[in-house]
Structure formats: structure tokens, C-alpha cells
Amino acid sequence: MRVSRPRESLTVGNLSIMHEIKVMELDGGEAAGVHAAPALGPWRPFPSIPAWPSFLSRTPDPSTLEKAKETADTSAVSISHAVLDKILAQMVIIVPCMDESPEIIEGVLSGIPHSCLIIIVSNSTRKPSNDGYQAEVEMLRNFCGSRRQALAVHQKDPGVAAAIKATGMPELIGADGTIRKGKGEGMILGLILAAALCPERKYVGFVDADNQVPGAVHEYCRTYASGFALYPSSEDQHIMVRLRWASKPKARGDTIVFEPEGRSSHIVNNWLNQVLSPIADTATSDRVVVTGNAGEHAMTMCLALKLMLAGGYAIEPFHFIDLLSRQLPSLSAVPSSASSVASYNSDADAASTSSSRASDNSLEASHVRILQIRTRNPHIHRPSDDSHISAMWKVGLGTIYYHSRELSSLEDLVQPGEPRDGGITTMCEKMLEFVDEHDSSQTSRDPAADGAHEKEPLPAPRIYPPIERLDLAALGDALEHGGVADSLKQFGLEAGWASSRALERPPVGAGLARVGTAVARFLYLRLRAFLGL
């Protein structure tokens, strides 16, 4: 894959938010590093046969070579198939789903590269007359056969909930003794399973289950790998890759309009950029964050273990809030995002979350990079109604509104020690005016989460402690050998899979790439012989 060369857009402490990276070529060739194809000279159309010998010349003009190298060095990076396949073989892809057609989910799975381990986290209806999860398991069984590695679990499995509670995260468990309802909670469960049962996998990513284009899913996974490949140094262990879709096609009458941004994403990105405007370059302050609602995102496992995580649809925008809050200069005087759990989580167990994490500075001392990459494929999924979209962007704004105290210290980075102008407070007031003007749902609840505060102007997201707080070894042993999880299914994994290395398979595209290269070289040599070169 060939992508534009990354550059920093904004740095706050040890956090770097990178400027939008673009996928320039889905297949960047076998050569790693700079894409040097322009050195061969200008492309000639087929009718220009006399120009072919100069095109194949072994001694291109030195000035052309130097100019091409200079241009390539500053504009793009190519990542080889071998590098991408090596990263994908160490990646887990989590697919959260709820009452989605098994045929649609199977299409999503077909786009996930073969060497990735799949985890399906389902919150589908389970009734004797309509067991959606059982249908998903049968689909997964048929899809995997004996070759694909996959896990499946139901979000409301009481055995899984009991094991997670016993090993260190009671906050995730609701009053009914199962994991709380919510897309974010399902994603957290997937992360927990990946960390406990697949400890040798270094990367974890997410794709939505309602994607209608398997080719887009395949691009997403390889784009994740490309992002990680850009920073191979052992010092860059905390990386998040967030995707911005090329477009979201919408049918309007008899015309398909390729919108550059989703409705919810447009609103959440705008307000996140307003938060960052005091410290951003004025020329790019409206484009620092372009992936506020990125459901398709991936990260290194070591970063996933250390993040505070939000429930429901707040999980994606809260990544920015959590990482920013850890870097701000007034953290010694203002409670961190960890202690903010107690301020608006309604249950008493929030206090234990706060006290257990308040002194943990492991992530604050690490360099974290957020890469935002724009893909090539359009994103086509099940359409959502206006009330659903309204609820989603309100959840995103709620993550900002209820962290305004921490975020207000951004102003100290511009004028240390000077009186604050109340910028964040003023912004929050404008935010509430925006909600009053544009909210058509007349509700402040996150449709994908338990425990939202109905009487608040914006829904307050539920915040969970980092996964590293769990005793992952004990949890993995209980889930694999304890027989506590009735819904947990595994495919293509041998006995002892939770404690063994992932099965190594040849890279998916390596064989085809080698064959293609050999054929191309043969034809090239025959053509040179024919032309007498």
C-alpha cells in the first residue's frame, strides 16, 4: 500500500495527533520505503510504440531520477506486501454486532485478511423461537471451516460477566449480572478477550458488522497495518490508527451523492476541533480531528490495555478526551479522566475505579501517536434514521461537555499563568444552544448504553477503567478451561490456544506476489531480447 507521508498536526505533551494521511495506492508494490516508480520516466500510451525502448532504458536521465526521488521522499511511503502481511498475522479484528443479518456479517468476515484472528461480539436477540446468536455461530462455523481462526461470544453471557467481575472489573457488570448493554461495552469485551485469550497478538482493530462492501473491509484492515508499519521503532509502542472513509454514499431521489463525511461525524469533529483551537495552527484548526466518531479504528495492544474506555457510542470520541486529559499541564491540580469516573457514573462502584487508577502514570509518560488515514473505498452500510443520528452526536458532545474542567487547561498552554478567558466555558454554553436548536429526538439518552442521565442536557457517558487492571492470566484460564462461558465458541484454534502463540501461516498475498513478479520479469527480458536491447 502507498500512503502519503505522515506529518504532525498537533502535539500536546507526549501526544501527537497526525495530519490526515491518504491512501494513495491500494497496492504499492513489493518495494518497501519510498515509491520510486517515477524514475522510469513518463508513462506512454499504447500507440506510442517507438517510445518503449527509452521507457525501458537502463540509464534514465540522472536529473529525472533525482527529481523523482526528491518528490517521492516528501510525498509518499510504500509498504510492501511482506511487511503488511507480517503485521496482519499479529492482529485481532473485533466485529461487534446486534441483530444483523448473518449474510451481511459473513460478507464483512470475507473481507478480513486470512491471517487476522476474528472475534465476533454479539448482543443479538436470544429467544427459543429466534436465537440470533446461534445463527451467527453457525454462519461463523461454516465460514471458518478448518482454516480460519475465530472466536465468538455473546455480550450477555452471565459466565463471562462473572469471570470479568471476579478478575478485576466489576464496573462493566450491570445490575442483572451481565455485561452492560452498549456498543462500547461490546467493544470493551472484545478487547478483554483479545488480551486474555490471544496474548501474542500485538494489534487489535474494529470493523462494523453492517458494512455492505467486503472490499472496503479488506482495505480497512490493510490500512491499519500500513499505519503501524509507518512507525516500526520499539519506541513507538502506543499507536492508534483511525480511519476516515472516502465517502458515505446517500441516495437522494434518483441520484447517489457521495458525501465526504457522515452527519454525526461532521458535528463531533467540529466541536472537538473547537476544543483544540486555542493551541492549533489557525490555518488547520478546523482539520486537526477528522475521525472523532471513527468506528473503524485500531491500536497497539499495549495502548489498548492502558486507555480509559467509554461505553455506548462515546467510546470513539472519548479516546481523544482521555489522551488529551492525560497530557494537560494542570493535571496535578485537576482530577484526571480516571478520577472523573466518579463525577458522573451513577453507580457506587465508580469510586473504586477512581481510587485504583488515580496514581497510574504509565501512559502519561509514553509517546502516543494518533494516525488519521483517509481510505479509498466508499463506506456503505445500513441507513440510520434522524433520531439515531441525533442521539449519536449528542453522545459525542457529552464526552466534551462533561470533561470541560480538564479541557479548560488547554488555555494554559497558550498563556501559562495568565487569567483564562473562559473559552471552554463559553464553548460549552454554545454547545448547549446548538443542542437546543438541532436536537430533533427530544432525548438525551445514548441508544447504545445503560445508565445515561435522562435529565441532563447531554448524555453523560459511562467511563470504565483500563483493561490492564484485570488479572488477564486468571481470566484467560477461567474462560478457556473453567467452563464458565457457555456462549464462547472457538474455531480453528488448537488445545491450549489461549496460552500458545498464534498459528503462523504464509502471508496471504506473498505467493501470488512472487508469481506475478516472476512472470513480469520473464516478459520484460523477452521484450528486451526482441527489441535488441
Image (cartoon, helix red, strand yellow):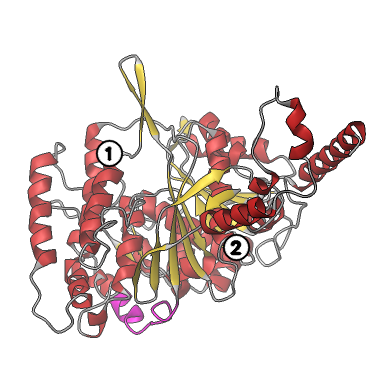
Residue at the spot 28% in from the left edge and 51% down from the top edge: 269
- Closer to viewer: mark 2 or mark 1: 1
> Which quarter of the rendering shows the C terminus?
top right
Label 1 Cα neighbours within 10 Å, binned few <14 / some 14-19 / many ≥20: some
Stretch of the chain drawn in magenta: 352-366
Query: Which SS does the magenta portion mostly show?
Result: loop
Residue 263 disc label: 1
Q: Along the horizontal axis of the image, is 204 left or right of 33?
A: left
Residue 25 appears in the figure? yes
- The residue labelled by disc 2 is 197
Type of amino acid at the residue the image marks with label 1:
Arg
Q: Mark 2 and mark 1: span between their CA atoms? A: 37 Å
From the viewer's perspective, is residue 525 above or below residue 115?
above
Label 2 Cα neighbours within 10 Å, binned few <14 / some 14-19 / many ≥20: many
From the viewer's perspective, is residue 165 above or below residue 262?
below
Residue 485 appears in the figure? no
Residue at the spot 49% in from the left edge and 65% down from the top edge: 239
